[in-house]
Amino acid sequence: MKPVDPIVIVGAGHAGVQLAASLRQMGSDRAIALINDEPCLPYNRPPLSKEFLKSDVDAKSICLRSEAFFRDNRIDLIAARVEQMDRTTCCITLSSGESMTYGNLVFATGARRRTLELPEGGHPNVCYLRSVADSERLRQYLKVSRDIVVVGAGFIGLEFAATAAAQGLRVRIVELGKRFMGRAVSSPVSAYFEAQHASLGSEIHFGRSVTSIVLDGGRLVGVTLDDGNRLSADLVVVGVGVVPNIELAASVDLPTENGIVVDETLTTIDPNVSAIGDCAIFASRRYGVPIRIEAVSNSVDQAKFLAGRLMGGSGAYDAVPWFWSNQGQSKLQIAGLARDVDQVVVRGAVGDGTFSAFCYASGKLMAVESVSRPGDHVIARRLLAAGTVVRPDQAADVGFDLKACLA
């Protein structure tokens, strides 16, 4: 294909929009088509479980870009789904019946919510929080609900729980694991947020799962747990993870695992096809294994990298992963991935709600989890990016200037 052939981006979330924007910022004059499977402008997802729930602002307030931006930058925003793809002819077919050819195609299809597979699990008062439509629906329910059960103690579930509890609603959190955010954070950070949610009045049930939705005359009145305990509820919010959208890629024989498999340049086995964001599992030089990261920051960083590669750049994607979560008055910021951690050192005062957990594996700093210590987070990203050695005793000493390690 000639380099002037269109770039087709399948998915208009953070990754897809950033890729289109970066290509134009870098001077690309190729045609760009951005396929959006939602009937609205692309929007910012993090506020959906926090600020957006608390107000009656219009969905336009969280749009990533205006209509004028797409028009002025010659980005063809198409409201449709991709129904079929042919890698031999470099052609896709949309739900509208239209066919399009591409020079490069990029999967930015993101992920969808994992559902609660139970009888009555489709009841209107069993809700999820992934899209702007979900958030608008929950915003209305919060005005009339009194007893809420949150299933899952990950970021989304806990952010929603904090928002609901702050409004004076009764909140019960049901988590199959033994602690909050068990796969994402260290024990000290998990324990801190457990205490914070308890202080907001939330009731916490660890090691439990929901086995049934209880109805009375069609009205949701509670849930039953696997120990037989029944919790009253007029609203159930489920946050039990997501599933990457890989079906289209798999249908055209592109390798998929827990995501669309790409190499360190974010390219699939087809040199004309790439994948970025929540749907992509990429070969990580930094961690030595394929990883898939569900984070806005990763989606944006990968989009910027891929734009550079499509403009003729080279190299491997190797950005330090980072994340954040606002729960009540506490802000959690994470730099790095806490893989195979065997030592955690706390810097600061847990009791004051301002501390960082430095996570080590065999003496190597792997991640830093900061609670209301933004300065630690900023320096941690620099330390991890540079591969700088920070000894555990240095990390624990609040009088030690971490910037000295960079020098």
Image (cartoon, rainbow, N blue to C red):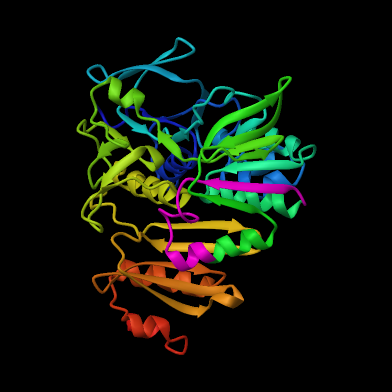
Magenta region includes residue 125: no
Q: Residue farthest to the front?
A: 228
Relative depth, front residue between 229 and 159: 229
State whether residue 26 appears in this view.
no
Q: Residue farthest to the right?
A: 144
Q: With respect to residue 345, does 297 lie above or below? A: above
Q: With respect to residue 99, does 150 lie above or below? A: below
Circle count:
0
Residue 52: x and y in percent read 68, 45
State whether residue 202 appears in this view.
yes
Relative depth, front residue between 59 and 303: 59
Q: Residue farthest to the top?
A: 97
Query: Going by the image, does 269 lie left or right of 67?
Result: left
Residue depicted at 77% across the width and 41% down the height: 146
Look at the image and give the residue range highlighted in magenta.
Answer: 168-191
Location of the C terminus by quadrant is bottom left
Q: Residue farthest to the bottom?
A: 399
Relative depth, front residue between 384 and 205: 205
Residue depicted at 50% across the width and 55% down the height: 180
Residue depicted at 22% across the width and 43% down the height: 263
Residue 192: x and y in percent read 54, 66
Residue depicted at 43% across the width and 73% down the height: 379
Magenta region includes residue 181: yes
Residue 280: x and y in percent read 33, 39
Query: Going by the image, does 133 lie left or right of 346?
Result: right
Location of the N terminus by quadrant is top left
Residue 61: x and y in percent read 68, 43
